[in-house]
Amino acid sequence: MWTGTDWFRFTVVREPLGRVWSAWVNKLLLRHPAFVEIADRLGLTTALPRTSDRLRGEFLSFVARVRSDPVGFYNAHWAPQTDRVGSLPYTHIGRIESLSDTLDQLSQHLGQPLPPIRRSNSTPLRFSPAVLDDDSRRALNELFAEDQRRFGYPPVEAP
């Protein structure tokens, strides 16, 4: 399977900083039941913000915590994707932003059309680089530099 040419080995990655934001919103801010205990144990419980400034402050606090100890706060939802992808011999590494390219290649490999695939796991608050201050933008760009390089995502710039 790992070396055969008849296998289509693929994975899909996502723009790193938007992925971190989405994970924070869905897992910590909205208190996903499976993450309440993890957040408490790691000291990542997020106060419920009532203003956009407080929302931003809570996210920047999260970024600072992860930056201070990326190993201690490691979680697959906000860890670099390079760690997850590793050096496996993929035939294709796609991007969620252009999932149709990956699905087209998979369909071509199978020799038949795929059934419709619905999108799920969306976030109720879209990421904007404006939420970041200079320190957090720099920290996240450093933390995800290898993802950006390997998967072709540019560093996030100041808006």
Image (cartoon, grey):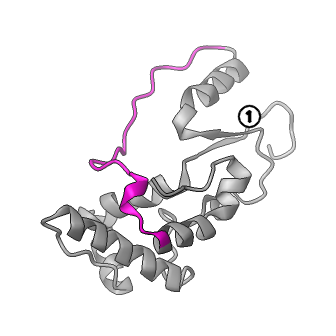
| Residue 31 can be seen, yes or no | no
Res 93 quadrant in image: top right
Q: Which residue is more in the foreground, 98 or 27?
A: 98
Q: Which residue is more in the foreground, 55 or 100?
A: 55
Q: Which residue is more in the foreground, 130 or 33?
A: 130
- Residue highlighted by disc 1: 8
What percent of the width, then of the height, locates residue 19? Answer: 47, 54
The reply to whether the magenta stretch includes residue 26 is no
Q: Secondary structure at mark 1?
A: loop
Going 51% across and 79% down the picture, which residue do you hit?
67
Res 145 quadrant in image: bottom right
Looking at the image, residue 43 lies above or below residue 126 = below
Tag 1: Cα neighbours inside 10 Å, few (<14), some, or many (≥20)?
A: some
Q: Which residue is more in the foreground, 21 or 4?
A: 21
Kind of residue at badge 1: Phe
Q: How many marks do you count on the picture?
A: 1
Going 68% across and 21% down the picture, which residue do you hit?
110
What percent of the width, then of the height, locates residue 31? Answer: 24, 66
Magenta stretch bounds: 112-134
What percent of the width, then of the height, locates residue 34? Answer: 31, 66
| Residue 88 can be seen, yes or no | yes
Looking at the image, residue 46 lies above or below residue 93 = below
Magenta-drawn stretch, dominant element (helix, strand or loop)? loop
